[in-house]
Image: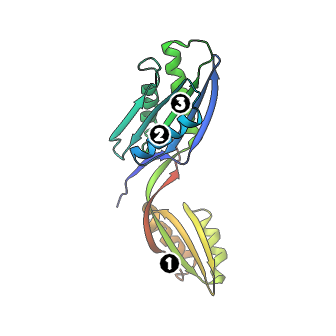
Amino acid sequence: MSFASYRTLMKRGEESFVINKSRFIGQGAPVSTEEEALAFLKEVREKYRDATHNCYAYVLGKNFGIMRYSDDGEPGGTAGLPMMEVLKARQVTDCCVVVTRYFGGVLLGAGGLVRAYTQGAAAALDAAGVGEMHLSTRYLVDLEYSLLGRVEHFLKDQPVIVEDKSFTDRVTLTLIGKCADRALLEEGLSGVTDGRAQLVPVEALYLPWEETCL
């Protein structure tokens, strides 16, 4: 069985640079609705209210169904659209990118602006980190204390998140793994515990996992 996955941002991120005395600040954030995208944009505008421009682009939906961008006063086609092209090229969605500009007194020209805003969007994505959003499952694993060491050693090499450990008369681990990896994880866990521990699924959720390549 296959599970849909898509690229999005791992967290909020920000990176700045200077081109011909103009300061650019690329900022990115994961969002899931237009309201969240606009709230992020409003936050950036308030933070940099004295900036010359706050240009933006955002994409929403697993099928990239909503795409919005703005030049915010820059010459048409020199800011928002180049930023959107970066999002499309990196195939990220459910994200918003804002590039803030403080004008430094030197005109960059149309080509220079396109390059600057392209660089700003790319810097925002790199700072926020691009990850693969996968359908995942939260599991509980109930263990005897004598099995904890070998299970922890096994999990270190597995694509799982150890979210919590609870110690009572036994040990209960809370794990998160991709649904696509469940069979291999179950087989490995059973092997290292001689069948004395198993995954108990408790919740399905979508989570970003660091991508292996772009």
Q: Which mark is residue 96?
A: 2
Q: Which of marks 1 and 2 precedes in the sequence?
A: 2
Residue 145 percent location from the top left of the image: 65, 83
Q: The residue tagged with tag 2: helix, strand or loop?
A: strand
Residue 28 percent location from the top left of the image: 53, 39
Residue at the spot of label 1: 198
Q: Which mark is residue 78?
A: none
Q: CA distance from mark 3 to mark 1?
A: 48 Å
Q: CA distance from mark 2 to mark 1?
A: 40 Å
Q: Is residue 124 above or below residue 189?
A: above
Amino acid at the residue labelled 1: Gln
Question: Which quadrant is the N terminus positioned in?
Answer: bottom left
Q: Residues within 10 Å of mark 2 (few under 14, many from 20)?
A: many
Residue 41 percent location from the top left of the image: 49, 38
Q: Is residue 153 above or below residue 84?
A: below
- Residue at (47, 32) in percent of width and height: 56
Residue at the spot of label 3: 99
Q: Which of marks 1 and 3 precedes in the sequence?
A: 3
- Residue at (53, 71) in percent of width and height: 188
* 178 displayed left or right of 124: left
Q: The residue tagged with tag 3: helix, strand or loop?
A: strand
Q: Nearer the viewer, residue 140 or 182?
A: 140
* 161 displayed left or right of 32: right
